[in-house]
Amino acid sequence: MASGSSVLADGHGQGQGGNGQGNHGGDQNQIQHVLLISIDGMHALDFLTCAANGTCPNLKALATTGINYLNTSTSKPSDSFPGLMALMTGGSPRTMGVNYDVAYDRALNPPQNDTGNGLLGTGPCTPGTPSGTSTEFDEGINLNSIPGVHAQEDLNGGAPSGDGGINSIDSTRLERDSSCNPVYPWNFVRVNTIYGVIHAAGGYTAWSDKHPSYSSVGGPSGSSTDVNLDDYYAPEINSNSANYLNPTTGAFPALIPAGCNPLPDQFAVAANDDYTGSFQNIQCYDGLKVNAILNEIDGKNHDGTGKIQVPSIFGMNFQAVSIGQKLIYKDGPTVPAGYSLAGGYTDSVGTPSASLMQEIEFVDRSIGAMVNELNVQHKLKSTLIIITAKHGQSPVDTSRYIRDGSDDPATLLSSCLPDSELNQIGPTEDDVALLWLKPGCNVATEVGVLETMSPALPLASNIAGIGEIFSGPSIALYYNSGDSRAPDILVTPNIGVTYSNSGKKQAEHGGFSHDDVNVMMLVSNPSISASTVTSPVETAQVAPTILQAMGLDPYSLQAVQMEGTQVLPGFRLGGDDNQ
């Protein structure tokens, strides 16, 4: 690995040394900072459409000095947790050990106390005898999660002071290892991350996301406090929006965006809804993280209270587009002018609804503000900007959306799948089904039950909308044999079929379909010549590309070594090929 002093302090990359690749020293590699943005849900199609229609001028401008990758796939499953960690590790769920926010591990023990989402704690734990447990890395591990009431009350996750982050994690709600020690999110990941590599090389690291649990980006440290993150900001997206302005546990005042004091959607506030239930309030939520990024570009910590340095790597996720794609508004009888009651698309070719267009334009303005601030601070030329997404959203054609909450695979196999949140084992379902069978149940037998109760033909008999069933040898396409976290059965449904049964959604993610996994990917810097790459790439390739751009060794990532993940094709800085 190149040294931190030569690469991260002055930005003069050392390339790949004697292997004849990369930037060969000198001033050719001026990348000192990487700004990584995930616009959750943003398809390549969404970018093509808004660029053509002039509704995302800032993203379009970045493409004039960038590479647009049209055929980009995110992780499978395409859930936020593995989608995020693919960007950070260069690996797939097979290697990362990350399947879903809520999944299962036969080699861990349940938490000590109940989580906010109902996973039962079991109190004392006996070392050396793991019983297996659901693994929960979402809002349920926050300090202030209240089972059976409103799962997450406070924007800061219940932290005793400050605005959240890892101080919001309740260690008694974390799964425990074979020695009965709590497993923190960053140690749950089996391989190292770009944050760990850059931090070890002396780089300053920052990230903002939707849950304290997504501090997993730091990667394994073996410590309960060392997260390889110098600045982590994680306002809880599933908290009660009525507490947005709470002076103790709400938004930090200096981060509140214009037009968000008070929140614009008071119907949602009155309903004690979280930020995912409002087209307007989600922008105020995301706006907090945007302002945190602007502070970091100015060399401050995320809340602007201290002067530090511009991070070597930093970034955030946007939730606005994802909400704009899937929300059917329920909190009030009307929406403001320019919005629609239902988000999503108006046709099969991806014409955005009025509400989705509002979210795309909001995100575009926010990214424009970041680019402008980089320019003001004379950091634009030294910053590599990567815009992509953790996941897509399915289906684009909302007329094909089917809610299936009574004949889903978990219901059909209910005798072998006790509820995961109550009995420590069971299914994870969105527009995919990951099924872990309880002891004594036979995989082949249960697959036979699915095939008998929901056969492919006649079509009307396929009551679970099953598209494909993976088990036995075919599970090896996605998981290693004997992996304690691998599901016994994986079901991918037909296009549009979901198992969430939510009346507030008309799209979902997590599955393997094109609309689930295809996302935008734009890599931009003033030294890059505009181009479009149509060959297939994966979001996992972002991780080694970032390290190579900074003059660090992509093979310092364990997942890159294990899976052979390549640097993104066609990536060049100043005409010098970085492959």
Image (cartoon, rainbow, N blue to C red):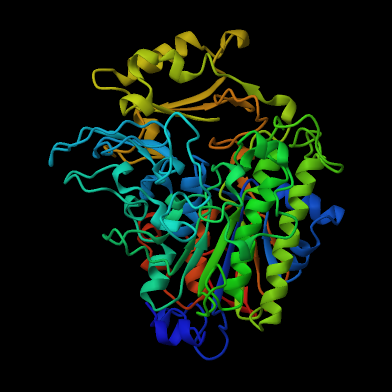
24 lies above or below 233? below
Residue found 42% across the figure and 50% down from its top? 213
Q: Nearer the viewer, residue 423 or 448?
A: 423
Give the x, y percent position of residue 504.
Answer: 65, 29
Q: Looking at the image, can residue 564 be seen?
A: no
- Residue 373 lies in what quarter of the image? bottom right
Q: 286 left or right of 76?
A: right
Q: Looking at the image, can residue 52 be seen?
A: yes
Q: Give the mark count.
A: 0
Give the x, y percent position of residue 405.
Answer: 55, 18
Q: 130 left or right of 256?
A: left
Residue found 55% across the figure and 48% down from its top? 74
Q: 69 left or right of 311?
A: right
Residue found 41% across the figure and 52% down from its top? 168
408 lies above or below 453? below
The residue most toward the bottom is: 26
Give the x, y percent position of residue 565.
Answer: 45, 58
206 lies above or below 438? below
The residue most toward the front is: 247
Give the x, y percent position of residue 496.
Answer: 64, 27
Rendered-image quadrant of the N terminus: bottom left
- Residue 167 lies in what quarter of the image? bottom left
Q: 1 left or right of 271?
A: left
Q: Nearer the viewer, residue 239 or 526?
A: 239
